[in-house]
Image (cartoon, rainbow, N blue to C red):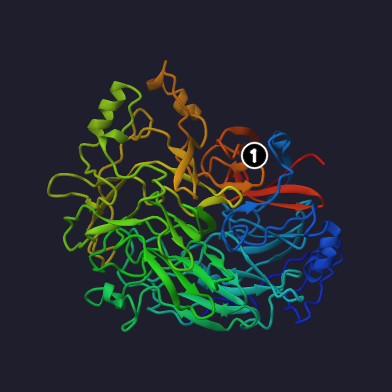
Amino acid sequence: MKLGLRLPPICLAMFAVACTPASDESDTLEPGGAPAARAAAAASDADAAAAAAGSASGLGYYEWSEYRANLAAQRYAALDQIDRDNVSDLRIEWRWYAGNYGPRPEQRNEATPLMINGVLYTTAGTTRNVVAIDPVTGETLWIWRPDEPERYDTAPRKTSGRGLSYWTDGQGSERLIVVTPGFYLVALDPGTGRQVPGFGENGVVDMMVGLRGEINEDSSIGNSSPAIIVGDTVVVGPAHAVGMRAPSKANLKGDVRGFDVRTGRQLWTFHTIPEPGEPGYETWLEGSAEYTGNAGVWAPMAADEELGLVYLPIEEPTSDMYGGERPGDNLYGNSLVAVDVRTGEVAWYYQLIHHDIWDWDNPTAPILMDITVDGEDIRAVAQITKQAFVYTFDRETGEPVWPIEERAVPPSDVPGERTALTQPFPTKPPAFDRQGFSEDDLIDFTPELRAEALAGIEQFRMGPIYTPPSLANAPDGTRGTLMLPTQIGGANWEGGSYDPETGILYVASHTNAWVMAIQSEPDVSDIRYIRGGGGELPWLEGLPLVKPPWGRITAIDMNRGELLWQIPNGPTPDDVANNPALAGLDVPPTGTPTRAPTLVTESLLFSAPGWGAQPLFRAHDKATGEVLAEIELPGAVGGLPMTYMIGGRQFIVMAVSGERGAEFVALALPD
């Protein structure tokens, strides 16, 4: 196989610096300016950086060193400088434009920056450049650019990705870890942006080496979420192309692998689709485990360093809406799996969907939390799902915190499909969004709209959650099955935020119908049926088919397994409020059919309406959801907000997209 990455895969643009590898001593670049020296100093001398910003353990300095704030993936920061009394005074402190990075301007950046040792690090551009930024001024310090033209051309995830990983041994050795669109694992010196020569080959490990399956024009593998680093082990999960219309039932397998953070040496492989003789192989009938692919971990991961466990939210196998080519329950597809970070061996697992044909793969990082249930202290892990359930387990043993019941679900009449007879339903907490589809879900602002909605769904099937997809032109005359939540949730990669002080989990979701219809297209795929055809989802006088709210934020008491409150993710949009079909009606807040990114601090819950909605950032009362302030932004929020403190000031940074494309904005109180 010809590699498309010319080593070193870098054009290190620290102003006018040549692209040369760093030495083991991380020699500092000084290209005629303070920014480079400042970046290098911040990375190579943590004590100096902490002294400049205020002690890391004091009141003036607070880092965001993991993609989701900590290894527990809680998205919580113990900061309260920005509070309910002053949050309305937030202003834009700086803007960093990402449009010049990559071969074309990126409209949406999904990355969450890290702030470590007084430097902000993020990915930018569709080629996934790595950038160091001054967290106070927004000044660019250095940039690393991957050079992988052939591999990039065939990559399934040509985006800036969702961020980076950081490691230090506490003795002066540091790494920034990025996985490129072309599936290389790269270690960078945080001070200079140069590749670390002792890691792999000049800082690069080729992740295509050691894959199971055939690399060909139909196969796909790449990455979208950051690796997770636990101790000295880098754990990498792969992402594949979207499988709604997969060209083949065969694909590369989405194995999860562990690497030595110092050397890049591969330490272990966890087979997400078992091999003969391994546990779980018996859940694949008719030899389907031999050729089926996917079952990767495209979502972020979480870890408990004390237990030495990494928690893997595994996606479904190939393909998304028809499982006739892979009969059986298909372990470890759609499972939450805890593996030993040192060996990759399974500590425990729980399959959340058997034989998934809804594309309800696990979309977000499991969240670790210490809760008290009926007087018992439990070290728990909670998996938020697209289908609007939160599955909660003892994170050491895998025992459900509350009973999970196997309940009968509707069968499929699609030729060749063999659906599971039952699916696991958690008894607590209740679902945080609507599930299944019935006439009760239809819009009902007026009798006329209701009648139009009833007429519009006559061509479709509907039923409770786990009603299977149907043929685009079924023998009974129907043209697909209506689905709630959809294949993008419910919840998705944005996940939730957890407050460890109160035990409250905040989850954003959206409610928007979708048609599950499949048909045979032998000229497109060797899979018997793929997504296609079907009836068109009706819009009613410019309004969605289902009743609002179309987006919501839910607060869940994880000590009791109960919903505390639920609010729309915003007011009624102008185009809905001013719709002639609703003239004279007092329309309650509907929210928008988007997923709100959230962030929780000691003082506030923050949210944004989400990608495709209003360019706003909101602060909420954590106990009630009441909106305390709205801050206007230059574009809709595309990534997840993060926060840090430096020099005694708290900043909130997020990726947005406006007229100029993607950019990062920093909010702070007036100095």
Determine whether 252 is above or below 100 in the image.
Answer: below
Residue 217 versus residue 373: which sits nearer the camera? 373
- Residue 309 in percent (x, y) is at 52, 71
Instruction: Looking at the picture, tell me which residue is in the foreground, 580 or 163.
Output: 163
Marker count (numbered): 1
Q: What quarter of the picture does the C terminus occupy?
A: top right
Where is residue 9 drawn, in percent x and y? Answer: 63, 74
Helix, strand or loop at label 1? It is loop
Disc 1 residue crowd, few under 14, some 14–19, many 20+, Cα 10 Å? some
Between 355 and 196, the one lying in front of the other is 355
Percent from the top left, x then y, of residue 32?
87, 66
Please give the residue where the numbered disc 1 appears in the rendered image: 633
Q: Is residue 224 above or below residue 147?
A: above
Residue 335 location in percent, x, y? 39, 65
Residue at 51%, 37% in the rendered image: 569
Tag 1: amino acid: Leu
Whether residue 661 is visible, yes or no, is: no
